[in-house]
Amino acid sequence: MVSIKKPDEKKRLAVFCSGNGSNFKALHKRIREKHLPCDIVLCLSNNSQCGAMTYARENNIDAVHLSTKTHPIAQDYTNAMLRKLQQHRIDLILLAGYMKKIPNDVIKAYPKKILNIHPSLLPKFGGEGMFGLHVHQAVVAAKEPESGATVHFVDADYDTGEVILQRRVPVLPDDSPESLAERVLAVEHQLYADALEKILSEA
Ligand code: GAR
């Protein structure tokens, strides 16, 4: 359920992460530097010890661990996620290196309110199993001349929702998956913050 607000009120954001959370940190930095009209109020993760959760705790952002370990029954897990989002009156959800599928009930409750960043030029190198280094390994193996990053809305499928912003990154002749990942990640940090600004300006 998305709350109805006056247009001058700040949007309340949730960030979902599984790992380092460098995109989360970049988003948080941009929000503070440019005084964007939003606050990150919730970090949700399937990994209680990941860098993103540590960063959230250090920055007084509610850090919530939700996984099939905390909630072995699928519907309980979905309900717990919806409850947390509702408790925090979340307007927008940003997936930032979140490696779990979002339950369909959550996608239905937040239409065009869930964003994801993917480290390739979608629709290329997207889909189930395409995440993190796997993406860059596939790009290098296919000898692609360029890769990049995409921010898109999340729909019920993997990496298929409407594209919000995309940016290209050349693949260099001596690139390894790791070196390509590093350059794409630097671009992601700018791109995700730009996409957030775009969405906020259109809201
Ligand atoms: C990023 O490269 C992000 O695009 C990717 O995981 C990394 C997370 O890094 N996400 C996916 O592959 C989703 N399909 P971070 O935790 O440092 O932001």
Image (tube, rainbow, N blue to C red):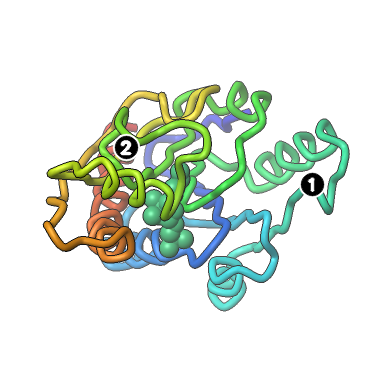
Q: Which of 25 and 135 is in front in this view?
A: 135
Left or right: where 63 falls relative to 172: right
Identified at 44% across, 52% down, the residue is 132
Residue 147 lies, in percent from the top left, at 21, 45
Residue 53 lies, in percent from the top left, at 60, 67
Which class describes the residues within 10 Å of circle 1: few (<14), some (14-19), or many (20+)? few
Tell me the element at label 2: helix
Is residue 185 visible in the rendered image? The answer is yes
Gap between marks 2 and 1 measured at Cα: 31 Å
From the image, state whether disc 2 or disc 1 is nearer to you.
1
Which class describes the residues within 10 Å of circle 2: few (<14), some (14-19), or many (20+)? some
Residue 65 lies, in percent from the top left, at 72, 58
Which residue ends up furthest to the bottom in the rendered image? 58
Identified at 59% across, 74% down, the residue is 54
* Residue at image mark 2: 199
Q: What residue type is labelled 1?
A: Thr
Tell me the element at label 1: loop
Left or right: where 118 falls relative to 65: left
Residue 22 lies, in percent from the top left, at 41, 65
Identified at 26% across, 37% down, the residue is 121
* Residue at image mark 1: 68
Identified at 65% across, 63% down, the residue is 63
**Quadrant where the image shows the N terminus:** top right
Q: Which amino acid does label 2 sit on?
A: Ile
